[in-house]
Image (cartoon, rainbow, N blue to C red):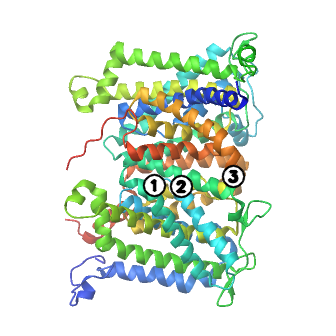
């Protein structure tokens, strides 16, 4: 097998893995957009917030330690214990649910019926707020995140030796594929299947779909909009937590984690704002597309770092031909 | 008592069509102009110019530009930072390529170049609408910043990758570089701000503005009554980018003096200007000024209170600032989704009847 082709396949596979992670973030957007028509820019910051909370709980940090020290002149930092990963994840989920409830109660309940742009702006305000709160609570320094089921059984990191060896024997070139990416893909797949099952087969899931179809009709058959919105925000918070764990384990927990929201936007455009399969297919296309473009054209001819904008350009070009995205609802306009 | 139409008789067409038909408004406007032109330049110092007045004037231009696009024409754009960068780099290339030409011309040309780029990125708006368009304009944001970072021609092959404003003067008065005096930079920006406000106000009152508003309210209906959506949308993009380009040029050459594109014109800038027009009020020139003033003043105020009075560490104050700005934005949207301009309108209605409200 020629070397160039082998590299290209390797880049393609890594692109697929990256695409899964983009899809994971995009999924959170779709959930909220479908159910409430809110374009939730804060999704990325929610991932950051969730990951920081998880690390903070694991390491037994005192929340708001910096602020307390600044106000009272004390010097507290840690409780001095560490919390098991599963318990920490459970506690973080509870925090995310509380957050979902608070967001619904204090912000969006008062904004029902406003124009979409106003709702969008409110989520940007929420993103600022959450980012500030996360930094105040847990400190803004770079943190390492690792989730361990027991001693030594952690999220795997680094090169997958088995794939490396097998492909080396088969093609004479060992593919470099990160273990974490493989785990992330599997987790994402499970999460998506779980969400689809939840939406299809449970009572709450049916209510959720009803709300997504038509608010007023759902209201008239006795579905509590308030409950559904808290539910949807909680689900989005949970998805954000999973995305936060995966990205955080990959590159550490810090501010740049919240920028994955920007990575998910072109995915949404491509897949359509209202479609779960769209988010997944879009994520894969964007992941593969940007990695291949960077490898084949960007790095050799354009000076590299094209990943920042390529996804947007791809989505833009695509939308010119199909304005509602791949799987979006057909836009019918009447006067 | 003070604010009413009664007794204000208009006897000519010119009087009937003036910008501020009500006396109180007109005198207030003259008063503001008088203070801005005749008083402030004589009392201004470096601190006031650099921390408040220059950013206010420059952001006000950007906010007017974005308000034309979002508030009047209904095309949501998140590419403001990128377009400001185009203005800044165009201004820089013009300043270094033609040192003898007046800065006025450079800034206006920078605006014109940005307008051309804006039209280019406005083309997809003919097909794409709503949030899809908002996200699509992010393509402009990221692509333009990348472009100015990667191709050394734009920053004249300087080692740092920054652009630095060389010293230029207007009529013998230095306005850029470290030797510029506060009042000169202030006056230069003020001229452009007043110019932008007058042009924008009159455009939005005229037939062009009415076409924009028709497109905003419902584009298909507008098309049916004979508004050409292609021309209306693209003129909105052009005019909006023109103002944003001017503000980018001033932001770089007068205010900062040295700029690194990712830092100065990143996506945060796009959001900041968008916040200004949302908090100020969509579709209102006054709102653009009010929003710019609010968001320029707020961080300065928080810093003064947090760092200087309470003596907290700067990083905590920075984080608190995020929390407070975020909370204020949300509060504002909950309390008054139509912004400061709407508060002002309500206040005026009350003033008309005051002191006998019934």
Local SS, label 3 = loop
For discs 1 and 2, the disc positioned in front in the rendered view: 1
Residue at the image position 37 percent from the left and 48 percent from the top: B130
Where does label 1 land, which residue? B77
Secondary structure beneath dot 2 equals helix
* Residue under label 2: B270
Q: Distance of mark 1 from mark 2, alpha carbons?
A: 8 Å
Q: Quadrant of the C terminus of chain B?
A: bottom left
Answer above or below: position of B234 versus B176.
Answer: above
The mark nearer the N terminus, 2 or 3, is 2
In the rendered view, does B342 fall on the left or right side of B34?
Answer: left
Between the C-alphas of marks 3 and 1, the distance is 39 Å
For marks 1 and 2, the one nearer the N-term is 1
User: Do the numbered discs 1 and 2 sit on residues whose CB atoms are within 8 Å?
Assistant: yes
- Tag in front: 2 or 3: 2
Rendering coords of residue B292 (x, y %): 51, 63
Q: Are marks 3 and 1 on the same chain?
A: yes
10 Å crowding of disc 2: few (<14), some (14-19), many (20+)? many
Q: Specify the subunit that label 1 lies on.
A: B
On screen, residue A117 above or below B38? above
Quadrant position of the N terminus of chain B in the picture: bottom left
SS for dot 1 = loop
Give the residue number, with chain letter if any, for mark 3.
B310
- Decide which of tag 3 and tag 1 comes sooner along the chain: 1
Chain to which mark 2 belongs: B
Indicate left or right for B149 with A286 as reference: right
In which chain is the residue bearing label 3? B
């Amino acid at each position: 097998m020629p070397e160039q082709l082998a590299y290209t396949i390797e880049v393609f596979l890594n692109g697929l893995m990256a695409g899964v992670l983009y899809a994971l973030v995009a999924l959170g957007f779709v959930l909220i957009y479908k159910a409430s028509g809110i374009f939730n820019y804060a999704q990325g910051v929610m991932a950051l917030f969730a990951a920081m909370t998880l690390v903070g709980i694991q390491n037994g940090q005192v929340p708001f330690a910096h602020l307390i020290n600044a106000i009272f002149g004390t010097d507290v930092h840690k409780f001095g214990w560490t919390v098991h990963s599963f318990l920490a994840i459970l506690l973080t989920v509870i925090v995310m649910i509380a957050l979902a409830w608070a967001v619904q109660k204090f912000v969006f309940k008062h904004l029902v019926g406003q124009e979409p742009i106003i709702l969008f702006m409110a989520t940007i305000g929420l993103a600022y707020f959450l980012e500030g709160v996360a930094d105040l609570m847990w400190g803004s320094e770079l943190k390492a995140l690792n989730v361990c089921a027991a001693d030594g059984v952690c999220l795997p990191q680094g090169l997958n030796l088995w794939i490396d060896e097998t492909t080396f024997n088969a093609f004479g070139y060992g593919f470099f594929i990160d273990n974490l990416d493989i785990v992330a893909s599997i987790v994402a797949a499970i999460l998506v299947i779980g969400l689809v099952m939840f939406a299809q087969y449970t009572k709450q899931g049916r209510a959720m779909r009803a709300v997504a179809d038509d608010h007023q009709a759902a209201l008239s058959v006795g579905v509590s909009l308030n409950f559904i919105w808290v539910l949807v925000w909680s689900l989005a918070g949970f998805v954000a937590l999973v995305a936060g764990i995966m990205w955080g384990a990959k590159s550490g927990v810090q501010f740049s984690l919240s920028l994955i929201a920007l990575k998910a936007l072109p995915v949404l455009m491509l897949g359509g704002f209202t479609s779960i399969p769209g988010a997944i297919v879009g994520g894969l296309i964007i992941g593969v597309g940007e990695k291949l473009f960077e490898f084949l054209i960007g790095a050799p001819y354009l000076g590299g770092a094209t990943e920042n904008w390529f996804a947007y350009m791809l989505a833009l070009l695509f939308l010119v031909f199909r304005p509602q995205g791949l799987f979006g609802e057909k836009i019918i306009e009447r006067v | 008592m003070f604010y009413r139409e009664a007794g204000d008789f208009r006897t000519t067409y010119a009087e009937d069509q003036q910008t501020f038909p009500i006396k109180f408004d007109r005198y207030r406007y003259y008063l503001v102009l008088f203070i801005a032109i005749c008083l402030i330049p004589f009392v201004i110092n470096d601190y006031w110019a650099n921390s408040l007045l220059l950013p206010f004037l420059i952001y006000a231009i950007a906010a007017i530009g974005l308000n034309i696009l979002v508030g009047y024409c209904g095309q949501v754009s998140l590419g403001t930072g990128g377009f400001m960068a185009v203005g800044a780099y165009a201004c820089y290339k013009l300043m270094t390529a033609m040192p003898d030409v007046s800065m006025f011309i450079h800034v206006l040309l920078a605006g014109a170049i940005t307008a051309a780029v804006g039209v280019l990125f406005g083309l997809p708006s003919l097909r794409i609408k709503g949030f899809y368009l908002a996200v699509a304009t992010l393509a402009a944001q990221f692509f333009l910043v990348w472009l100015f970072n990667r191709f050394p021609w734009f920053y004249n092959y300087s080692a740092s990758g920054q652009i630095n404003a060389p010293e230029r003067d207007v009529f013998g008065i230095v306005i850029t570089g470290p030797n510029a005096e506060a009042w000169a930079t202030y006056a230069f920006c003020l001229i452009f701000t007043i110019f932008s406000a007058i042009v924008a106000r009159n455009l939005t009152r005229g037939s062009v503005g009415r076409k924009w508003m028709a497109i905003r309210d419902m584009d298909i209906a507008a098309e049916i009554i004979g508004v050409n959506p292609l021309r209306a949308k693209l003129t909105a993009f052009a005019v909006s980018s023109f103002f944003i380009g001017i503000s980018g040029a001033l932001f770089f050459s007068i205010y900062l003096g040295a700029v690194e594109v990712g830092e100065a014109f990143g996506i945060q800038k796009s959001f900041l200007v968008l916040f200004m027009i949302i908090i100020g009020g969509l579709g209102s020139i006054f709102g653009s000024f009010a929003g710019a003033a609010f968001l320029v003043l707020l961080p300065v105020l928080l810093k003064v209170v947090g760092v200087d009075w309470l003596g907290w560490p700067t990083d905590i104050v920075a984080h608190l600032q995020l929390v407070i700005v975020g909370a204020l934005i949300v509060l504002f949207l909950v309390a008054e989704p139509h912004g400061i301009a709407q508060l002002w309108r309500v206040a005026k209605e009350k003033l008309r009847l005051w002191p006998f409200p019934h």
